[in-house]
Amino acid sequence: GENVEQHPSTLSVQEGDSAVIKCTYSDSASNYFPWYKQELGKGPQLIIDIRSNVGEKKDQRIAVTLNKTAKHFSLHITETQPEDSAVYFCAAIGDTGRRALTFGSGTRLQVQP
Amino acid sequence: KAGVTQTPRYLIKTRGQQVTLSCSPISGHRSVSWYQQTPGQGLQFLFEYFSETQRNKGNFPGRFSGRQFSNSRSEMNVSTLELGDSALYLCASSRDRGYEQYFGPGTRLTVT
């Protein structure tokens, strides 16, 4: 089945700096790659997603890039703010018939004011 | 628009007991998926329901089961609880199976 690896596991940046989180996936048939933000005591919140027919997608300070050949995708957060501090998860849908998300292990992002 | 709701939010059970968790999806969403989140295993897929039918199942024992009602609300049941079942159980709903899944706040289950 699908396997998703995520790194780094922790990331500390200064307010205003950029943050980048990277994920690799194993199933070349994967076609959907969402990113989730999870704050303490809450469920994961969908923040951005990308499909395999698109190379990059932006939404204000957040962007996701996809490299299908290398089977990796990345989350970019610019001008980080303290409220960006959370755990971020990447995910992928591998077998299109199964339609189940396989998650990475998470990145704890801390933005220092 | 109301989000995904899950009840109860917290639950404490004893080994050997059974538990039922409930999930109400976003209005108009017909697909409901369940995930288990633990510090050791991360987020793992349990099962997905669409139009009252289980469409997919993750790698969990038969003690874990679920169902979906005609109004798309879903329940999951865990029988003969074990200590290792302590986890955050998350429900997610989507309009298009698998894509754009929106999660509820979860039910924190503690087994003692």
Image (tube, coloured by chain):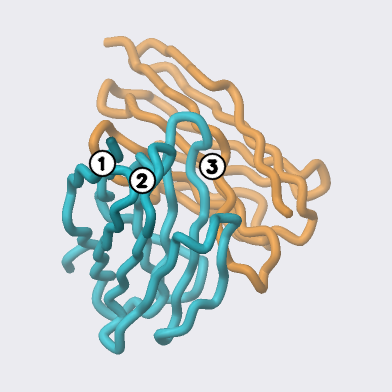
Chain colours: A orange, B cyan
Q: Amino acid at mark 2?
A: Pro
Of residues A3 and A112, the one drawn nearer to the viewer in this rendering:
A3
Residue B92: where, in percent of width, then height? 37, 61
Residue topped by disc 3: A90
Cα gap from disc 1 to disc 3, whole angstroms: 17 Å
Q: Amino acid at mark 3?
A: Cys
- Viewer-nearest of labels 1 and 3? 1
| A29 relative to B11, above or below | below
Point out the residue furthest to the front here.
B16
Residue B63 relative to residue A100: left or right: left
Q: Residues within 10 Å of mark 2 (few under 14, many from 20)?
A: many
Q: Residues within 10 Å of mark 1 (few under 14, many from 20)?
A: few
Q: Amino acid at mark 1?
A: Lys
Residue topped by disc 1: A42
Residue topped by disc 2: A44
Task: Label 2: state its secondary structure.
Answer: loop
Seen at 27% across and 62% down, the residue is: B20
Seen at 37% across and 59% down, the residue is: B79
Q: Are marks 1 and 2 in contact (CB under 8 Å)?
A: yes
Seen at 49% across and 58% down, the residue is: B46
Of residues A1 and A44, the one drawn nearer to the viewer in this rendering:
A1
Q: Which mark is residue B108?
A: none
The quarter of the picture where the C terminus of chain B appears is: top left
| Label whose residue precedes the other's in the sequence (1 or 3) | 1
Cα gap from disc 2 to disc 3, whole angstroms: 11 Å
Residue B99 relative to residue A97: left or right: left
Seen at 48% across and 69% down, the residue is: B48
Badge 1 sits on which subunit? A
- Image quadrant where residue A98 sits: bottom right
